[in-house]
């Protein structure tokens, strides 16, 4: 199960993810979430309610963040669950996306 | 299309046969009792035949002497080969409907109703049967293809090494039919050995396509450049060139060991892969942790490597995350469990050791690959 909710103000869009992020989330991330948040200067991925991200899910997150960064947006990932953080650390996500992304 | 009509009234049989015949259904068989129908369907003692008779639809009367239509339907439907065979009940009395549907009937026809109703129901049942049949054929074909692909993929795996100074064994478990994991090793000379394990993101066919295409390059990479930072660089270049323009980020994690048996030293790179484990006698295992990012993500990835030395006897375990990962549970906890379990099996001979480690697999949704390197 994967769901999301986007909360916005003038400059910032926060995406609240819920459920597992795996290959099934791909279409939603690309077709719905990416276009919805890309106009905002600051984009926050809130992972408070995400307890599992598999390797395809990581690929999707990397791609989303990179696309937004290329547009000059500030992207942040916050409230990552410890189990998910372990996987991010294993894959050295801070090295790939920049250390400042996690908060 | 072949239709079987079962009715104890000869008059009804003739009538139905005529209506269907006039509508163009030529292959019609009739039975005047359930037992006769079973004979045509090769059902003996209520047991399913090995092969289904060539019947595509049964029109079945409910009220018959001996075995009635509802019981007959239940028996036919209990046969594996007839589970998808549509059965339409013939009845004069709606009182039987509920029971008839519960027994596995797909439709009913009221006796004495207009011909067009009979023909419409027969047509839709036959159309459904045809679709189910062709779907089954397709599924069967895909299944066979995947089985073949699975054998093909296993056939490119490196055979075990059984030397006096080094033994390498593995366990390769494909989640669906094909795997995104790939292993490779090579003795460069009697003193030097290279061992590589990769895990392509995702699983299933797309991951397997990537793992197989990378496998085809390994003789030209590991076999030629040998040293970890060069192997890493080459793999990344190839991965970027092949799949870098893909809409979705395709990458793989990898761990590669360059083992020097003379100096008892291992140089390795670990590209986002779970840590390899180095076991030395009576010591807590050393983790061969990450030195760089996964392969295929960045154009210019750092090519850091690390060096560990060992005393013999030693054993190294490499594995893909399917062995230690479980949704919602800490991967570190999984690795710790593996460390304890592997240590308790330390006395086992290398091949048996690898097989025992398979027991740790929590869920078979992911591919799993385990390599054990014994340095006696």
Image (cartoon, coloured by chain):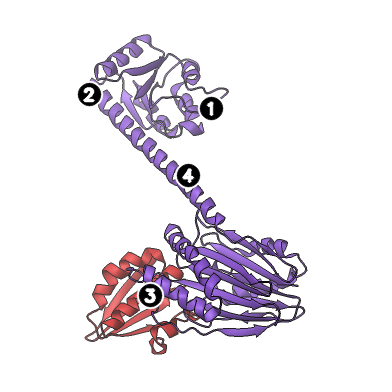
Which tag is nearer the camera, tag 3 or tag 2? 3
* Residue carrying label 4: B144
Question: Does the image show residue A33?
Answer: yes
Q: Chain of mark 3?
A: A
- Considering depth in this image, is B86 or B99 the residue closer to the camera? B86
Compared to residue B195, the image places residue B34 above or below, namely above
- Considering depth in this image, is B12 or A97 the residue closer to the camera? A97
Give x and y (percent) for residue B106.
37, 32
Instruction: Left or right? Give the position of A37 relative to B89.
Output: left
The colour applied to the residues of chain B in this rendering is: purple
* Residue carrying label 2: B116
The colour applied to the residues of chain A in this rendering is: red
Q: Farthest top residue?
A: B11
* Residue carrying label 1: B49
Q: Farthest bottom residue?
A: A100
Determine the secondary structure under disc 2.
helix
Instruction: Left or right? Give the position of B119 relative to A84.
Output: left
Determine the secondary structure under disc 3.
helix
Evaluate whether label 2 is on the same chain as label 1. yes
Figure quadrant of the C terminus of chain B: bottom right
Cα gap from disc 1 to disc 4, whole angstroms:
23 Å
């Amino acid at each position: 199960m994967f769901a999301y909710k986007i909360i916005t103000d003038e400059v910032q869009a926060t995406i609240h993810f819920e459920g597992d992020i795996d290959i099934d989330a791909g279409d939603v991330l690309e077709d719905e979430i990416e276009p919805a948040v890309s106009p905002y200067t600051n984009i926050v991925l809130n992972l408070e309610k995400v307890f599992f991200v598999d390797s395809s899910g990581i690929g999707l997150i990397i791609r989303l963040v990179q696309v937004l960064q290329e547009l000059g947006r500030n992207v942040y990932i916050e409230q990552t669950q410890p189990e998910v953080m372990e996987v991010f650390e294993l894959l050295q996500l801070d090295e790939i996306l920049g250390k400042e992304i996690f908060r | 299309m072949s239709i079987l009509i079962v009715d104890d009234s000869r008059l009804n049989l003739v009538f139905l046969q005529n209506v269907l015949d006039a509508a163009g259904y030529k292959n019609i068989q009739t039975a005047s009792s359930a037992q006769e129908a079973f004979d045509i369907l090769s059902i003996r003692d209520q047991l399913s035949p090995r092969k289904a008779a060539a019947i595509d639809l049964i029109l079945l009367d409910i009220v018959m002497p001996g075995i009635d239509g509802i019981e007959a339907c239940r028996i036919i439907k209990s046969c594996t080969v007839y589970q998808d065979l549509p059965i339409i009940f013939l009845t004069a009395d709606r009182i039987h409907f509920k029971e008839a549907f519960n027994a596995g009937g797909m439709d009913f026809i009221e006796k004495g109703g207009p011909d067009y109703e009979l023909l419409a129901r027969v047509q839709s049942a036959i159309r459904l049967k045809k679709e189910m049949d062709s779907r089954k054929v397709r599924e069967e074909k895909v299944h066979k293809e995947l089985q073949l692909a699975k054998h093909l993929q296993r056939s490119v795996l490196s055979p075990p090494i059984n030397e006096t100074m080094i033994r390498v064994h593995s366990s390769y478990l494909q989640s669906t039919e094909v795997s995104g994991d790939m292993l490779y090793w090579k003795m460069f000379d009697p003193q030097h050995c290279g061992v590589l394990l990769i895990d392509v993101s995702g699983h299933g066919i797309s991951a397997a396509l990537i793992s197989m295409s990378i496998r085809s390059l390994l003789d030209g990479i590991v076999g030629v450049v040998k040293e970890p930072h060069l192997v890493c660089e080459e793999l990344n270049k190839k991965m970027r060139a092949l799949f870098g323009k893909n809409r979705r980020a395709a990458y793989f994690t990898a761990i590669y060991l360059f083992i020097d048996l003379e100096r008892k030293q291992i140089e390795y790179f670990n590209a986002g892969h779970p840590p390899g484990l180095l076991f030395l006698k009576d010591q807590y295992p050393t983790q061969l942790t990450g030195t760089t990012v996964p392969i295929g993500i960045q154009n210019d990835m750092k090519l850091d490597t690390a060096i560990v030395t060992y005393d013999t006897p030693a054993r190294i375990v490499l594995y893909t995350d399917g062995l230690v990962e479980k949704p919602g549970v800490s991967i570190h906890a999984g690795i710790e469990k593996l460390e304890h379990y592997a240590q308790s099996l330390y006395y086992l001979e290398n091949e048996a050791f690898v097989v025992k480690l398979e027991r740790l697999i929590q869920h078979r949704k992911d591919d799993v690959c385990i390599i054990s390197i014994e340095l006696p």
